[in-house]
Amino acid sequence: MEPEKSVENELNSGKMPKKMRGLKDLVLSMLGLVAMNGVIQLLLYPSISKALGEDAFGDVLSMLAVVSVLATAIGTGVNYARMVAETKGRSANGEFNLFLLISMIYVAGISVGASVLILKEKGVLFNVLFIVLSVLSVLRYYGDVEFRLKVNFFRFFVYYVLIAIGYVGGSFLVRFNVFGGSYSWVIAIILGEALAVGFVCVTGDIFRGRNVLKPSPFAKENVNTAMFLLATNLINALALQGDKILLQIFRQGSDVTVFYVATLVGKIVALLTTPLNGVIIGYLARYKGKFTKKFFATATLIAVVVMAVFTAGSVLASHIFVRLIYPNIYANASPYFIFANAGQIVYFTAGTMMVIVLRFVHEKYQLIINTGYAVLFVAALVPLTKYGGIWGITWGLLGVNAVRFIAVVILGFAHTDRDKPSIDETANETPIDSTEIQ
């Protein structure tokens, strides 16, 4: 009698048809992310909001925005650099772990600075805990590369389920105020991050072995790639989290809370569609045809229709979801639903269009567009937020995201119908991978 196979071995067996394996990988990726973010949105954040109140919850969101910027820029940047190294035959762990280790100095300094400036928190214990949270978040954003490299999406799924389990336990710590209001929310998030990082340490190879901190012969090239992708992801992360940071600087914590709630459903939609970028990259990698005007015009038309449909759906869902989960904030947030969600939808659609365009143009254009976007973001949103508050940042985000979308479309049409499209391996590994809504 044939021995019974484990669920993991069955899912990862080579007997499954190729198309079915691709669908299975996509489903597992989405289920893991949905599990984690479902707990965040339905349990963890509402618990923190109820325990601390609207104003203090806004301060916490601002703190977590800083953590997210660090984790996305460093963790996701190095994650993609490790993937690029693998595809180019420069596989190594040492220089990436050293890069992460050195970056922790900056992570610690920025974390303490944010704690003092935003929360006016000078207690040693709180700041140590917040540094631990920030460091674990960076490692967690990097850690799933272990399962991407091995194409083991069952463990990728388990990785994010463990985060969700940690957050569930943390939510009860917050709800019952186990460690006090100043510490419970930090420890709650540490639980989830620690479970994920521990899982990688136990089951994976990226943080273990004789060469765990030994640079490879390709160290210079790998570090250069990591720096480039860090810069790209930093710009994206600041754009995604900049609303909370600017509202915190120029307004107050309650405004951060209201705008966060107003944009929440739009960001959830963006999260759920992020894995589709990977599917698009996979199909475009095998596409041998020309980048024609008809091809790109069709893609652009589909994008416009998607933006309209998803915006309408997000507004409708916001009236239901926010009323149920944040009833005390609904009245203040509802006037912003249409334009705030539209801004989020336009942003992620522009990112998907960039994925398509980068299949046919040099990756330098991504850095050019993202840098221009960052400059416009600061130039427009700083005064709009300072003088216009929530409405100012709502209109500002919609405007700058629309400009980004138009710039990507213009870039695409400028490179259609060329005889030899420029294809770069790194370009297909650099779209932002938003795995958490904060």
Image (cartoon, grey):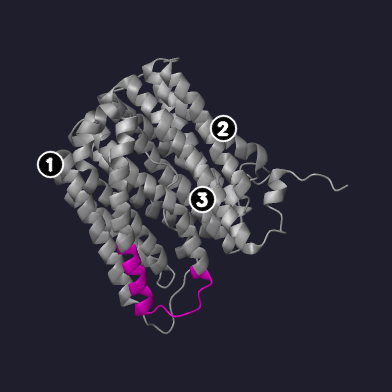
Q: Furthest-bottom residue in view? A: 419
Q: Residues within 10 Å of mark 1 (few under 14, many from 20)?
A: some
Mark 1 lies on a secondary structure that is helix
In this view of the protein, can residue 376 be seen by the observer? no
> Which of the two labelled residues, at mark 1 and mark 2, occupies the earlier sequence position?
2
Labels 1 and 2 touching (C-beta < 8 A): no
Q: Which residue is mark 2?
A: 195
Q: Residue at x 83, y 45 (%)?
A: 3
* Range drawn in magenta: 284-304
Q: Which residue is mark 1?
A: 388
> Which of the two labelled residues, at mark 2 and mark 3, occupies the earlier sequence position?
3
Q: Position of residue 282 (x, y in %)?
A: 52, 64
Q: Residue at x 31, y 35 (%)?
A: 322
Dot 3 amino acid type = Asn
Q: Which residue is mark 3?
A: 79
- Marks 1 and 2 sit apart, C-alpha to C-alpha, by 42 Å
Is 292 included in the stretch rendered in magenta?
yes
